Amino acid sequence: RNAYINILKIGSTRKRAMGKRAERGSFLVNADDFGLTPFINKGIIEAVEKGAVNSVSVVANGGALDEAVTYIKSHPDLKAGIHFTLIMEKPVAEARMLPSLIARDGRFHRDYNTFIREYMKGHINLYEVKIELGAQVKKLLDMGLTLSHCDSHQHLHLLKKISFIILRLCHSYWIPRIRIVNEPPSLGYIGRFIPLMAMKYLSCRLRQKARLYNIDTTDKFFGFNTSMNVNEKVIKKAL
């Protein structure tokens, strides 16, 4: 499944703002979609056990969430964040409260392209987004997780209006870090050049906004180009 390499800057924005001594930088290999399905959980758990992954992003509306939460609680050194999800899955909040987000089958819009199209047309109700994303955070917190970061399925948190909602949630629920995409382009993945450049632009804006909320961001990021194939070569490049 998707794995991303996040390199965190030395010290967090909040700790610098509070005048505390900065910590050393951290190198995280993060696996998205923890809790989505038993099959995905199995792969992530195997990667954690082998020392290949030291951070996970949890899907609050995943079908195998209980197993993921139980595993996280039994591994206190494993960092766990929330993987905000607004496509494909069933909502955490009541579907009747989210008409602009829900398709006829009772699930979110089927893919990234559909969501973006509806978003660009102004058909996505931002109040409904706030209700659903807030419900996702509360669900994980109520299950006893301490959230170290946030990101999202298909990087939808980078969208300008969505990012404002998420930054406010991070500030309210003390989620100290948000992932941004600042990966350098690669000639080996030329087909991803345009979407990568778009996300880098949105990430730059998000980083500026995050500073206003004292929310930290990843200093470096690798994995968008390679997404399903983060291997030893990618990790060495990140280092």
Image (tube, helix red, strand yellow):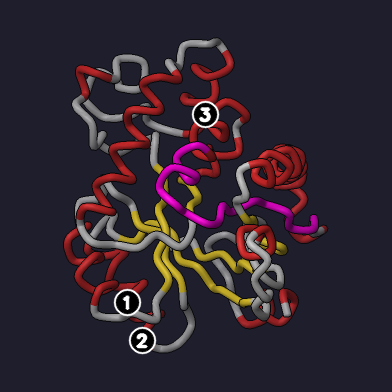
Q: In which quarter of the image is the N terminus?
A: bottom left
Mark 3 belongs to which amino acid? Asn
Q: Quadrant of residue 23?
A: bottom right
Q: Distance between the residues labelled 3 and 1?
A: 30 Å
Q: Give how far apart the Cα atoms at labels 2 and 3 are.
A: 35 Å
Q: Foreground residue, 238 or 114?
A: 238
The residue that mark 2 highlights is 49
- Circles 3 and 1 in contact, beta carbons < 8 Å: no
In which image quadrant can residue 75 be found?
A: bottom left
Q: Is residue 149 left or right of residue 93?
A: right
Check the picture and name the quadrant holding the C terminus: bottom right
- Comparing marks 3 and 1, which lies closer to the viewer? 1
Q: Which of 140 and 16 is in front in this view?
A: 16
Mark 1 residue type: Ile
Furthest-bottom residue in view? 50
Q: What element carries label 3?
A: helix
Up/down of 133 relative to 15, above or below:
above
Question: Is 104 in front, or is 177?
Answer: 177
Q: Name the residue under label 1.
A: 45
Can residue 158 be seen here? The reply is yes
Q: Give neighbour class at mark 2: few <14, some 14-19, many 20+ (Cα, 10 Å).
A: few
